[in-house]
Image (tube, rainbow, N blue to C red):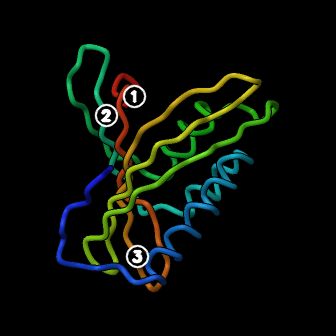
Amino acid sequence: MTFLPDTGYVPTAEDRASLDAWFAEYDAQSAKRDVERMADMAVFPLNLVSDDAAGNGRSAQWDREQFVATMTQVMGDGSEDIRFESTRTPVFLSPSMAVVFTDSTMTTEGRTQQLRYADILVRRDGTWAFQTMIQSGWGDNL
């Protein structure tokens, strides 16, 4: 069982529903490899946190152009089917800030890969956007 920290804010049903809807849209765009639309769902500069092959923590800030170029390269040309099955555990810090931990299974061409990552999202004018991506193993690419 996972125990979430007491942040002092108890999310409403609408908070959770709006965050779930945001992730459903982001996952759909990821599956289609619509990197431009994925970029529309972010706040730039985007913070990235990871570790490298030597075990050192790394971080970077990307502008939209860097995000689109890197994600286009990482996600491929879209010729193979890609599916994500994700379980998300959000920790709301306020009505407009959430840290979301994700356990995901990515399946492409019959191969599966387990992913664990976290995102920091902010809500502005009623719309969520990711601002920080945190995932192990990508530091050499930052």
Of the pair 122 and 65, the residue shown nearer to us? 122
- Which residue is at a point 33% across and 66% down the rendered structure image? 98
- Circle 2 sits on which residue? 50
Looking at the rendering, in which quadrant would you find the C terminus? top left
The image quadrant that residue 36 belongs to is: bottom right
Total labels: the figure holds 3
Amino acid type, residue under disc 1 in the picture: Trp
Disc number at residue 90?
A: none
Disc number at residue 138?
A: 1
Amino acid type, residue under disc 2 in the picture: Ser
Which numbered disc flags the more N-terminal residue, 2 or 3?
2
- Circle 3 sits on which residue? 123
- Which residue is at a point 58% across and 36% down the rendered structure image? 105
The reply to whether callout 1 and callout 2 are in contact (CB within 8 Å) is: yes
Amino acid type, residue under disc 3 in the picture: Arg
Q: CA distance from mark 1 to mark 2?
A: 6 Å
Residue 37 at x, y percent in the picture: 64, 59
Q: CA distance from mark 3 to mark 1?
A: 26 Å
